[in-house]
Image (tube, rainbow, N blue to C red):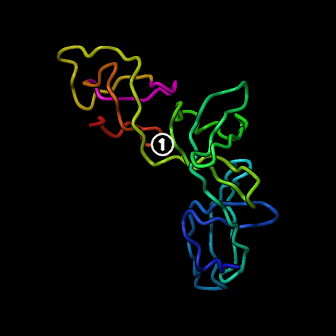
């Protein structure tokens, strides 16, 4: 059991029969009445985000989530195959369960796959930043550098991001996997 006073970002809890990850939390102590904790929780089974308010000090169960490093192998219809790099065991994850993560995943990438209770697959945990190759973008036009001029670039995974004018096709760039924005060139 864990108290709502001890919440941390990224913590996993069991609440009303579902498994949630704490995205944000705010302790509120109004002038009148009891203190409470306002939270934003992500359902790890469905991906939906819910706002929940708890009374301060309420106890909830902690969800034990195991993370196993796996390598992405290939897509097989609506399923995606991952392999445990230690035991070489392969698992399939349905497309709907990792819809957003597929914008960043490519063959051979190592990611953490989250399991609940050792058997139930909850999804994929990506690193905060990934290096991806630009496969298509418009060439820069000389003199078109007014301000922070940006252009569209399509990456090896099919994701489209806005990049500075100096980025060329074939270059690798760093992309933030939380918001899908360009960070920098890959060194």
175 horizontally vs 10: left or right: left
Determine if the magenta segment contains residue 160. Answer: yes
Task: Identify the residue shown where x is 56% and y is 76%.
Answer: 27
Q: Position of residue 70 (x, y in %)?
A: 58, 45
178 horizontally vs 173: left or right: right
Task: Identify the residue shown where x is 57% and y is 45%.
Answer: 85
Instruction: Count how many numbered circles sit on residues in the image.
Output: 1
Choose between 106 and 181: the one closer to the eye: 106
Q: Quadrant of the N terminus?
A: bottom right
Choose between 16 and 91: the one closer to the eye: 91
Assign a secondary structure to mark 1. loop
Determine if the magenta segment contains residue 94. Answer: no
Which residues fall within the magenta stretch? 155-165
User: Does residue 65 lie above or below 35 as drawn?
Assistant: above
169 horizontally vs 4: left or right: left
Residue at numbered disc 1: 177
Q: Position of residue 58 (x, y in %)?
A: 71, 80
Task: Identify the residue shown where x is 65% and y is 27%.
Answer: 75
123 horizontally vs 144: left or right: right
Q: Position of residue 129 (x, y in %)?
A: 42, 44
Task: Identify the residue shown where x is 52% and y is 46%.
Answer: 126
User: Does residue 155 lie above or below 35 as drawn?
Assistant: above
Picture quadrant of residue 102: top right
Picture quadrant of residue 38: bottom right
Q: Position of residue 68 (x, y in %)?
A: 60, 53
Picture quadrant of residue 153: top left
Q: Quadrant of the C terminus?
A: top left
């Amino acid at each position: 059991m864990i108290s709502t006073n001890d919440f941390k970002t990224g913590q996993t809890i069991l609440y009303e029969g579902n498994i949630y990850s704490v995205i944000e939390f705010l302790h509120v102590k109004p002038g009148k009445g009891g203190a409470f904790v306002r939270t934003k929780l992500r359902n790890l089974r469905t991906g939906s985000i819910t706002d929940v308010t708890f009374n301060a000090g309420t106890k909830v169960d902690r969800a034990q989530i195991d993370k196993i490093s796996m390598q992405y192998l290939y897509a097989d219809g609506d399923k995606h195959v991952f392999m445990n790099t230690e035991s070489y065991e392969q698992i399939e994850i349905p497309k709907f369960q990792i819809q957003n993560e597929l914008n960043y995943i490519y063959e051979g990438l190592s990611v953490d796959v989250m399991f609940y209770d050792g058997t139930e697959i909850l999804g994929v945990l990506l690193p905060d930043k990934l290096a991806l190759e630009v496969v298509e973008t418009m060439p820069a036009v000389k003199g078109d550098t007014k301000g922070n001029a940006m252009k569209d670039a399509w990456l090896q995974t099919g994701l489209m991001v806005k990049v500075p004018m100096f980025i060329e096709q074939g270059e690798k760039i760093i992309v933030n996997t939380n918001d899908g924005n360009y960070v920098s060139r890959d060194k």
